[in-house]
Image (cartoon, rainbow, N blue to C red):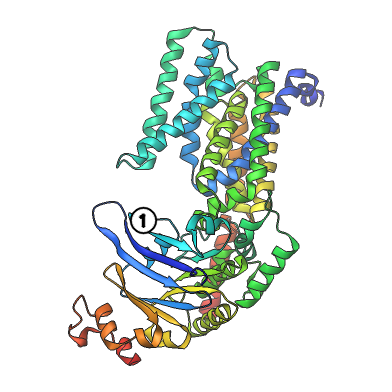
Amino acid sequence: MDALLAPLGYDFMLRALLVSSLVGAVCAVLSCFITLKGWSLMGDAVSHAVLPGVVLAYLLNLPFVIGAFVFGLISVSAIGFIQSRSRVKEDTVIGVVFTALFSLGLVMISRVSSDVHLSHILFGDVLGISQNELWQTVVAGAVALGAILILRRDLLLYVFDATHARSIGLNTGFLYAALLVILALTIVSALQTVGVILVVAMLITPGATAYLLTDRFSRMMWLAVATGVLSSLLGTYVSYFLDGATGACIVLTQSVLFGLAFLFAPKHGQLARRRQQRLEREAELQG
Amino acid sequence: MSAPALDVQGVSVAYGGGRLALRNATLALQPGRICGLVGMNGAGKSTLFKTIMGFLPPLRGQVQVFGEPVRQAQKAGVIAYVPQAEDVDWDFPVSVRDVVTMGRQGRMGLLRRPSAADRDAVQAALARVSMTDFAERQIGELSGGQRKRAFLARALAQDARLLLLDEPFGGVDVGTSEAITGLLSDLADSGRSVLVSTHDLGTLETFCDDVALIADRTVLTVGPTAQTLTAGNLARAFGGRSPLHDPARIPERALEVR
């Protein structure tokens, strides 16, 4: 028993649990919009594309969130620019742009110095988060969460039916840009916890799990937050015993929850669907 | 005289590429009237709707709604638009009530929380299209006709002065079709203006004050139903470019009218 409670005796563990659950909550809320909008690849792209920004921020001695945020915006602008001026399909453009920026980041790291811990940027290091980084994470996450909550209903309408949103006078161009900026900010806030490579899981898995569990958006948000926070807490806790790989533990927990929902969700899970199909067939055979 | 509800002046648009999708189209609709938009598939009916809504920017000409530019009218919540086929994800986690409430969203406050008046308007719109019993259903659980009615209810809840309905009768049963014509007449009686496209020439006279014939990407003619729905005009709209075209090619329904 004492061994199980031991992690809670350390400040760094409490801090990690706090930060990762905050990040889990913010990502989960956004994930509902990202999955419904079909922007998973965009999330993956922006998260990889921030790498050069993080390195540059280190070189210029700036807060890492600023460098990452700027490069997040650069990547989405480049994607939009190229897509509107060429015949290449959107997912292709996204792939081209983010791999280019990610590679640029890798080259920069190899040229710069060994002080930048590549693995920390790529995979996160929430157990070793500094006070400074913690504040940057909290501020970026809080701003993103605030923006989503304020724009929540307009973003939902935009994601569901942009034509109608425009018809009733909403500024869909603004909502598109707002969603991208919020995406970049959220990714930035999650960097310390899960790193560049796994951020995308935080941005889609909770939303995907919740989507299997309900047909109502507000409930979907709460369920996503619940699975996101639970995964962050469990993953961080387990990683204490593994001595690392916190981000991966969090993502794995999310994946397990998704798997459970996929199988056992009351209406949209595999078992429920099979049962439903069997009942329909039997009713038809008898009728 | 007050400004027309809808004023389309010599509008031409293109979808990209060289070919025009609409050529010099002109059409005016006075307040409180229902105008049926009739023409063959591909004549440009849906394109005209999208142009009026500003989704396709005009190369020439202009569109005004109650004397204002379209965008301004949209921001004022004056125009409701129901596209031919709702291009939405039917698995989206929203109920019928959620969708209808979205009709009111333009007029809600900063956080877009529905007020009591909004909820009443949604309830009334649902009742008007006989969808009250289905209000809590997820939209994918509806039949084709019910989906149409749900989105019609959203336009009603918006309480717009001008309604643009693109093929509301497409793929619905006779009951729903009659319910929609009754609804349109009520709207016109309360001073709303309606532009509605349809294939069904047989019922046009029963509920349209005006008819606009559209062919080969432009408005051939527009005017009061009785004067406009002549065999000659229909031949021009449905029989090809030449007014002297073989009448055998006019659809049977078109001939039944006169």
Q: Subunit of mark 1?
A: B
> In x, y percent, where is residue A221?
66, 47
Identify the residue at image location x=52%, y=10%: A59
> In x, y percent, where is residue A146?
68, 38
Nearest to the observer: residue A64 or residue B219: B219
Q: Examine the rendering and report whether any part of residue A70 can be seen.
A: yes
SS for callout 1: loop
Neighbour tally class for label 1: few under 14, some 14-19, many 20 plus, Cα within 10 Å = some
Q: Quadrant of residue B135?
A: bottom right
> In x, y percent, where is residue A192?
61, 23
- Image: B73 above or below B228: above
Q: Amino acid at mark 1?
A: Pro
Identify the residue at image location x=36%, y=41%: A84
Mark 1 = which residue? B58
Extreme-front residue of the structure: B1
> In x, y percent, where is residue B229?
34, 85
Q: Quadrant of the N terminus of chain A?
A: top right
